[in-house]
Amino acid sequence: MTVTAAAATDRPTCSPLPVLGRDVRVPLVTGGEVEYGALDYAASAPALQRVWDDVAAYAPYYGSVHRGAGYLSQLSTDLFEQSRETVAAFLGCRPGDEVLFTRSTTDSLNLLAAALPAGTQVFVFETEHHASLLPWSRAREVQVRYLPAPDGAEQAVAALDAALAAAADGPKLVCVTGASNVTGEIWPIRELAAAAHRNGARIVLDAAQLAPHHPVDVAELDVDWVAFSGHKLYAPFGAGVLAGRADWLDAAEPYLAGGGATRSVIHTGDAVDVEWNSGTARHEAGSPNVIGAYAIASACRALTEAGFEALAAREQELLGRLREGLAAIPGVRVLSLFGPDAPRVGVLSFVVRDWNSSRLAAALSAEYGIGVRDGLFCAHPLVRTLLGGEPDEPAECGVPDDVPGGRPLNAVRVSFGAGTPDEHIDRFVNALATLVRDGAAWDYTTENGRCVPARA
Ligand code: PLP
């Protein structure tokens, strides 16, 4: 089976956005080289050309932020603060909401976990990414309730409602992923937020996978906080965002102790008397990552100006093309929690009957120049549930590696976004169909835990 550009029916109204690395060529183990097929956007997306250009234009003016009287320091401070405003507008923040620049989604959620009032009960589905599953149990004086994997979106809302209604009085927080990094499925965010609020809880949205694919409006969704990462939003300069309500953040101990977080420090005898800042400075100690923040703001502007709704519509068209292609390949099982009709973004995981997923991903890379991801995707409980429990298949990817009819060890994930050309999806479907039909052309072995081509 071969998928071609002509197979698509409703053509998208916008083109892919220019990204770096679009014309990078990679060597094949079988000889020659091809243009790289970047289909691992969910891990880290390529930089938008626009982001790169904006950062390059600013770079000569780079200076310290919040700590310099010179012209470039003033300029850099203004740029950093304007970046907050751009992100606030991109996220539809409410008056009074704060935008904190962090290192990543993981950092943002750990920051919020450290800021929870004593006695907070946190409610989280076991299906979350580890970044939204794990920070809460490390927080002091916080209890975590792990909710089992729901069968569907409505059941998720009902389960949360019931768990919150049965909870004791006191502060409560719900943490939910906007779009799954495994299935790409979009969670019922508005409904979960309503359930949280009618039970006196707050809610934080992990938008690491949603924000790059779909407009996120904090006020409209009625979530209390949102977190995302720059490197998944085409802005790979080491910054992330936590945005939302100021009160719990202002009442908490600063996330990091150090310069910038303090209003005054007085040393008397054996003690230092510290007056901490409030507002964003309270949790942003140390020299801020102005390039990272500016890059995120640039990406927000680029997506908005390109027409985010049109980009999302184009992505849906590519997703339809991908799913149609996979459906025609024998033995492919697409992983899903909410069923085939659930709304989803351009992230999809699958297994192929009698194929080791790591060997499949290695062959896609080595023989076809296509970069996908294999594994449990930092969401072990979810992927194990979707795969049907503990694996039967041995971990080695070399021969003998496949157990006919056995339970797979892990899965393959393909993910794409605003920079993906149609032909990368077609190339992927055609490569997978050929591998499944003819088998791999090369031998693979496990080295340092990775499945790699065996030496010739
Ligand atoms: N949440 C989700 C849903 C993710 O997919 C990821 C990363 O893959 C994270 C959180 C963590 O993001 P980061 O590694 O940028 O902190």
Image: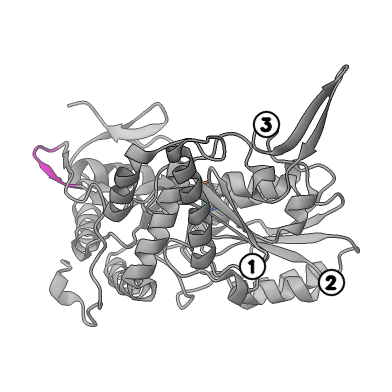
Q: How far is mark 1 from mark 2, CA to CA?
A: 17 Å
Identity of the amino acid at label 1?
Answer: Pro
Residue at (27, 60) in percent of width and height: 420
Task: Tell whether position 93 is magenta.
Answer: no
Asked if 339 appears above or below 240 in the picture, the reply is below
Front label number (2 vs 3): 3
**Residue sitting at the far top:** 269
Asked if 74 appears above or below 166 in the picture, the reply is above
Mark 1 close to ligand 1, CB under 8 Å: no
Per the image, the residue denoted by label 3 is 258
Front label number (1 vs 2): 2
Verify CB contact (< 8 Å) between mark 1 and mark 2: no
What residue span does the magenta drawing correspond to? 30-35
Q: Which mark is residue 150?
A: 1
Left or right: 344 as drawn, with respect to 314:
right
Residue 348 can be seen in this image: no
Q: Residues within 10 Å of mark 1 (few under 14, many from 20)?
A: some
Sequence-first tag of 1 and 2: 1
Task: Tell whether position 34 is magenta.
Answer: yes
Q: How far is mark 1 from mark 3, CA to CA?
A: 42 Å
Identity of the amino acid at label 3?
Answer: Gly
**Residue sitting at the far bottom:** 10
